[in-house]
Image (cartoon, rainbow, N blue to C red):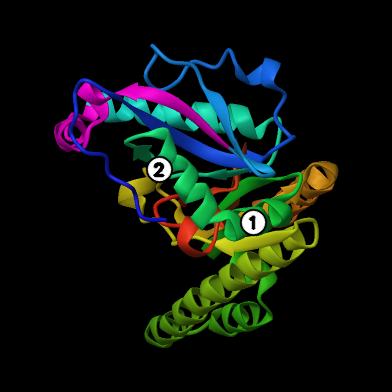
Amino acid sequence: MTTPFIESDKDKCGYYVYGVVQGASVPPTEMQYIEGIDPAFPVHALPYRDIQAMVSEVSLVEFSQEALRTNVRDLEWLKAKVCIHENIVETISEHCAIVPMKFCTVFLDIDRVRETLTHYYCELSNTLRRLGGSREWGVKVYRDDEILASKVEVVSDKAKTLATQMAGKSSGAAYIWKKRLDGVVAAEVERISDECAQTSHDRLLDHAEDATGNSLLGKDITGEEAEMIMNGAYLVSREHVQAFRAELDKLRRKYGRLGFTYRESGPWPPYNFVTGSLAEGSRRS
């Protein structure tokens, strides 16, 4: 959904939209005390047919198009407001399914919010039905190359055979056999990594409604010394969460000894499962 940039009018308030939920699914008493991204205004529901936009008013002094151009360059302001936005969406998602909107989705007036709900009504309704009582879980898998390489000779028949054949060779012949062994070990590291990632994904998907993959992140972004080999997002219904996490523990026991580490996060609002025109800017890595 294209962000509906507001016009600069510092005497007015705009409407910040956090997401859209089913009309009867949010208890008003639990929502009315949530402080909005502008602390002067609480979060409240704007109903349209059988859906609701969760909104709060915001001062255009801070959230006009002109002001936002300046504010998003202020990293402290940006970090604080993104955190508030995500906390509000996550709080709402604890009570019901939500189609989360991208950060700083702001409208000039309430009529423009209603127009958007009207225009996207079918897409929003279908997405909410698909999400149902599910929330998103993230699973990242990292590989320690040194540990895995040290285990390859134990788990790989081909590597074990070469290591045996290399024993007792002269120094010159042993050097050649060592180069062959290094090549086999490197290939086996990649093969076992691919197997780990695919098996992990398949087994977790057995306990999820849907799944998607995000881009693998480099060490410069993760801050990890280990290589990321899987970055998955899983849409898991509340009744399947226990089985999903139990499967994750089984995978840790199976692959942890080979140098693979699993990092889970969640539950989150289903950022990665909002599709179509609603998906723009809402994905979580």
Question: In what element is the residue under mark 1?
Answer: helix
Question: In what element is the residue under mark 2?
Answer: helix
Quarter-of-image position of residue 97:
top right
Name which residue lies at 47% across and 75% down.
Answer: 186
Q: Nearer the viewer, residue 215 or 142?
A: 215
Q: Which residue is mark 2?
A: 112
Give the percent coordinates (x, y) of residue 117.
52, 48
Give the percent coordinates (x, y) of residue 180.
46, 85
Q: How many marks?
A: 2
Name which residue lies at 68% across and 70% down.
Answer: 155
Instruction: Estimate how packed mark 2 is, as few (under 14), some (14 to 19) or many (20 or more) residues with alpha carbons within 10 Å.
Output: some
Res. 144 in view: no
| Marks 1/2: CA–CA distance | 21 Å
- Span highlighted in magenta in the image: 53-75
Res. 123 in view: yes
Give the percent coordinates (x, y) of residue 50.
69, 44
- Disc 1 marks a residue whose amino acid type is Thr
- Disc 2 marks a residue whose amino acid type is Arg
Against 24, residue 173 (above or below) is below
The answer to whether residue 63 is magenta is yes
Against 93, residue 235 (above or below) is below
Q: Which residue is mark 1?
A: 127
Name which residue lies at 65% across and 70% down.
Answer: 198
106 on left or right of 201: left
Give the percent coordinates (x, y) of residue 123.
59, 60
Name which residue lies at 75% across and 58% down.
Answer: 209
Instruction: Estimate how packed mark 1 is, as few (under 14), some (14 to 19) or many (20 or more) residues with alpha carbons within 10 Å.
Output: many
Counting residues from the start of the chain, the first of labels 1 and 2 encountered is: 2
